[in-house]
Image (cartoon, rainbow, N blue to C red):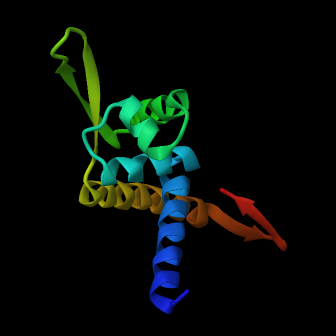
Amino acid sequence: MDSMNLKELFDAKTFAHILRCLLNLTQSEIEVYFALHEHPNKSVDELAEIMGKDRSGVYRSLQNLLEKGLVSREYRILKHGGYKYLYIPVSIEDLKKMLKEELNRWFKVLNEVVEGFTIEFGKVKES
């Protein structure tokens, strides 16, 4: 593996870890999100087939991503009756913005916790 591929692998793993920590995403949700970036405007069935994953697992991940605001869906009427939803991921720029907002929120909470610590008679106490 050359250094460029190793760097890309490290960056992808690091980014996935950040998504897990900050947005409380599962590995499956992360995989679905990135697969959707490679194949936008796909239905659950199409995405499950592309990923080689079980439809119910992909559906569950998409629902969780939808609730967390990381994907949207569009309603499409089928020619022969019925309908289906096509899923669209938020842009990477919007994802970065969400991550930065969450980091700022975490920083504020952590700062308040740190500021609340005091030392009395050799013991650390929270105010």
Query: Looking at the rendering, in which quadrant would you find the N terminus?
Result: bottom right
Q: Is residue 35 at least partly visible in the picture? A: yes
Please provide percent x and percent y for residue 56.
Answer: 53, 27
User: In front: 5, or 113?
Assistant: 5
For the point 47% across and 45% down, the residue is: 51
For the point 55% across and 56% down, the residue is: 21
Q: Is residue 26 at least partly visible in the picture? A: no
Query: Looking at the rendering, in which quadrant would you find the C terminus?
Result: bottom right
* Image position of 42 (left or right of 22): left
For the point 27% across and 48% down, the residue is: 90
Please provide percent x and percent y for residue 4.
Answer: 45, 87
For the point 24% across and 10% down, the residue is: 82
Please provide percent x and percent y for residue 22.
Answer: 49, 55
Please provide percent x and percent y for residue 28.
Answer: 55, 45
* Image position of 117 (left or right of 1): right
Q: Residue furthest top?
A: 81
